[in-house]
Amino acid sequence: MGYQRLAYIIRWSSPRVLDRIRPLRSNFSSPREASFLSSSAYSTSQRVRLRSLKSSQPPRQRLSLYIITIMGWSTHASGTLDPPEVRNWRIHLVALVASCSALAMGYDTAVIGGTMALDSFRRDFDLAGKSQSHRDTVQGNIVSTFQAGCFFGALLTFPLAEKWGRRKTVMLAALVFLIGGTLMTAAHGKLEMIIAGRAVAGLGIGASSLVVPVYIAETAPPSIRGRLVGIFEIASQGGGMLGFWINYATDQTINVESQAQWIIPLALQLVPGVGLFFGMWWCPESPRWLARGDDFEGAERILCTLRGLDRDHDYVRREMGEIRQQVEERSTMRMSKKQQFKKLFQKGTRNRMGIGMALMFLQSFTGVNIITYYAPRIFETLGVSGTSLRLFSTGFYGIAKTLGMICFTFYVVEKVGRRKGLIWGAALGCIPMWYIGGYVMRADPAGAAAAGVVNRDAWGYLAMVCVYVNGFIICATWQGITWTYCSEIFPLDIRMLCVAITTADTWLGSFIIARSTPYMISDLGYGAYFFFSAILVCMGIWAFIFVPETKGITLEEMDALFMKPMHKAVWAQLRGKELVPERSDSVSDEKKYIESEQFERKE
């Protein structure tokens, strides 16, 4: 019997079956099959402790989780000390509630392009008879003011998140977003209200995009930190998909003479904002933020709730020991603003800032954002004519992006890893963009459609497929990994400052793309696709040389990883050299170490 089939059989058995099967390992023909049932295979190969079978979980659930982990079907990172109890429903629900901010962000980002393409919107806002140049300017202003608001929202929220905490800041961001959404919905033909509403909503989204990934990363266990931050990205792409399809649905079902055709898509953005505000009432504060305020008792209480473990459990004591050690060594609340900014340029921090800023800025230049912001216009350049058909094609682009983000969350981020995901994403994502540029250069489908010639052949359909493939690949890699990476790599004492800068950086890149894309499409044509393809190639080379792997590393261990120059750290990882010191299995040893450090400082 093969060990795969054996695992399937005992998956639904009680733990006592293990004792009956283990003596049979001598009958297996393969050493690999025999070692599968040995205790060493359980503890060493997969770094899963046998004592996890003695937890408070029901026997069937215990063994089910255990066998899935050993067989490699898990969606969490291997090589951590996380017991299965920490991957519970409660921590996932916290991430889901907080990710309502991403749902609002994705929806608001995607819905505006399709809304501006609706005939009712063009009529009510006096855009129907205007020149293409005038429409490009108006579209650029409407889209880019949102990114400008996000930029300032991310920067201005940093001191609030440090003083008030993550939870209250997210709730405030939700209120600001609701005000902006209300202004847009009540515009009634006034472009000024649309632009003002976009800017105010951007302030709220920028604030939440800064705080929520950090909040999720600070509450998540290491083995599923990437997965939980990935939920944030799934919600973002899912919101974008909803925005695309709701525009199509209103175009098909609501009469063009009615203002409701464009009001309904803009009004629906208020739903996730309301869900975020009331949902955060239930969510706890970040235990690491509480610890930095010397509220270690509150931090431990919340940590026990999130992990589903007692305070006397080895895992909770170990994690609290790591948090306490780092907080006692350095804390923003004991640093002046000048010291905080000075630390940005110190060894071990400046390289993280460089990587984080490059990742967040460059992700706007993968080509996905130009299609998201101006999807109907992009499909028009591929020869897709008619508002309804362009909106329909855009809807499938939203599906491709969402599927890519699901792939990222449940496979790429913890199984493939951050570094490999970036490299493969750039290598594969540039291919569809090269083809689209070549097709537009040779066939000029937009010019043919304008002349009334619609002759779409197999090459044209392949170009449309390439748009979807590019969206899937980039969302499965760069779109998700960048947010995850920047939420986890920075030091605890200046984490919010660093994330504020990198988050504002990504919105700066998005603003540049949103403002320039209409002119790039009109003036460069196929050259726009070649431009983004070339940037993707450069991004992949840069990631290969300078971006180290952080999968499965605790937030407190990032300091050791980033103390070396990045190219040396990457080379050491490629050679299999351990850069992060081994975690002690003895909680008492950790406590003695912390106590000795405190004693030496007193002396």
Image: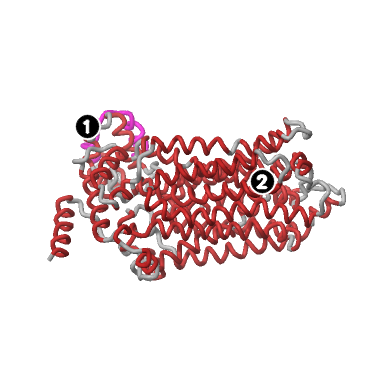
Residue at position x 61%, y 53% in the image: 369
Residue at position x 37%, y 60% in the image: 494
| 72 on left or right of 334 | right
The percent position of residue 235, horizontal first and vertical second, equals 51, 42
| 275 on left or right of 558 | right
Query: Counting other residues with Cα less than 10 Å from the Cα at mark 2, is it few (<14), some (14-19), or many (20 or more)?
Result: some
Residue at position x 65%, y 37% in the image: 265
| 363 on left or right of 249 | left
Magenta part of the chain? 1-26
Which residue matches tag 2?
193
Is 312 placed above or below 560 here?
A: above
Residue at position x 26%, y 40% in the image: 301
Q: Check disc 1 and report its element: helix, strand or loop.
A: helix
| 251 on left or right of 205 | right
Q: Is residue 8 magenta?
A: yes
- In terms of depth relative to the viewer, which is nearer, 311 or 259? 259
Q: As shown in the figure, which amino acid type bears the numbered disc 2?
A: Met
Which residue matches tag 1?
20
Is 240 placed above or below 144 here?
A: above
